[in-house]
Each structure stands twice: as structure tokens, then as C-alpha cells.
Image: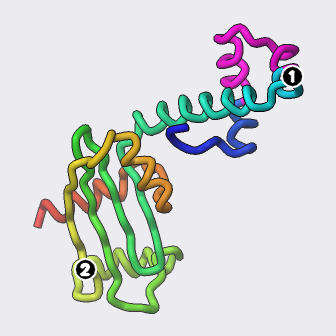
Amino acid sequence: MKYTRLTKEQFESLHQEFATFLASQSIDKKEWDEIKTNKPEVAEQELDVFSDLIWEGVLSQTSYLEHFSKNHIFLFHCLESDVQSIVLKSLEPETDFMTTKGLEWMVNNLFTDAIEIHVGKKKYEEEKNSAIFKIIQEGAILSDGQLYQQIDNILNSK
């Protein structure tokens, strides 16, 4: 398995897609029930293959990721050969970027000595989707890129 198996909730929300996946392999409901009962290892393999297909599709379309922690915001722009990053670090320990108040504080203090901003770029050391998946495993979530673009525009207009 290249990525991780989808959760039960994710499988439930992708029920129709999974049925289509099984149908593409000429497996109907009755046969799937037999496989689950009599060949659980084959059922496990099918779940893993489907999970990898879903992850591959999602990761291939991913352009932006965000990771918020108490004192840091990591913003990523995933390009074809590299990932660009903007990291905001609060130098005020009581600031909490995980709260609305903390985000408002960040907006008001973006270009003060209270926030460090680091911009970076790194070539993928492995296949692009695997690199993006690692960032997600470390806590990042998919993003529409709005925050990255806003801060990038502000930084490039200075």
C-alpha cells in the first residue's frame, strides 16, 4: 500500500465510488459479500487498492496545504517540481493561531517584530504525491490557497 487506508467514514462517504470500483473488476454485491466472508485477505487488498486510487486522485489535484499550530502557520504551494512555503511564527508565546483571536492578532501584527516570516522552496526528494502525502501526515490539510496567495501577494508587493 502506497498511502494509508481510508477510514470507515471515508469509505461510507465514497460508497458509490467503491461500488463502481468493484464493478470495474466484475465484482457485484453478492460476490463482494462472499469475498469478505471467505477471503478476508482479498477484501483487505481491494480496500487498500481503492484507498490508494482515491489518495492518488486527491493528491494529484492538490495545490495548497495549510498547517496551523499554536505559534506557527505553515502554508504550502505544491508545484510540479517543488513545494514553496511561507511560515509565520509568533514570537509572543501567548498567541494561539488555532483560535479566531490568534488569527486576528496575526493580521494586525503581520509586519511587526512580533511575527517572523520565512519563505522557502524545496525540490521534491521523492515522487510529488508521496511528498504531499507526508506533509498531510504531519498535520497539514488541503486548502484553497487563499491565505497563501494573500500573504504571498503582500510579501511581493513590499
Identity of the residue drawn at 53% across and 76% down: 99
Residue 152 coordinates in the image, percent (x, y): 23, 59
Q: Which-is-in-front pick, marks 2 and 1?
A: 1
Q: Which residues are magenta?
A: 15-34
Quadrant placement of the N terminus: top right
The residue to which callout 2 is attached is 116
Name the element at disc 2: strand
Mark sitting earlier along the chain (2/1): 1
Whether tag 2 and tag 1 are in contact, CB under 8 A, the answer is no
**Dot 1, how many residues are within 10 Å of its Cα: few (below 14), some (14-19), or many (20+)?**
some
Q: Is residue 22 above or below residue 154?
A: above
Residue 42 appears left or right of 60 = right
Residue 40 coordinates in the image, percent (x, y): 80, 31
The residue to which callout 1 is attached is 33
Q: Is residue 68 above or below residue 36?
A: below
The answer to whether residue 29 is magenta is yes
Residue 88 coordinates in the image, percent (x, y): 31, 73
Residue 16 coordinates in the image, percent (x, y): 72, 23
Q: How many marks?
A: 2
Name, please, the residue furthest toward the left. 158
Residue 112 appears left or right of 157 = right
The secondary structure that dominates the magenta segment is: helix
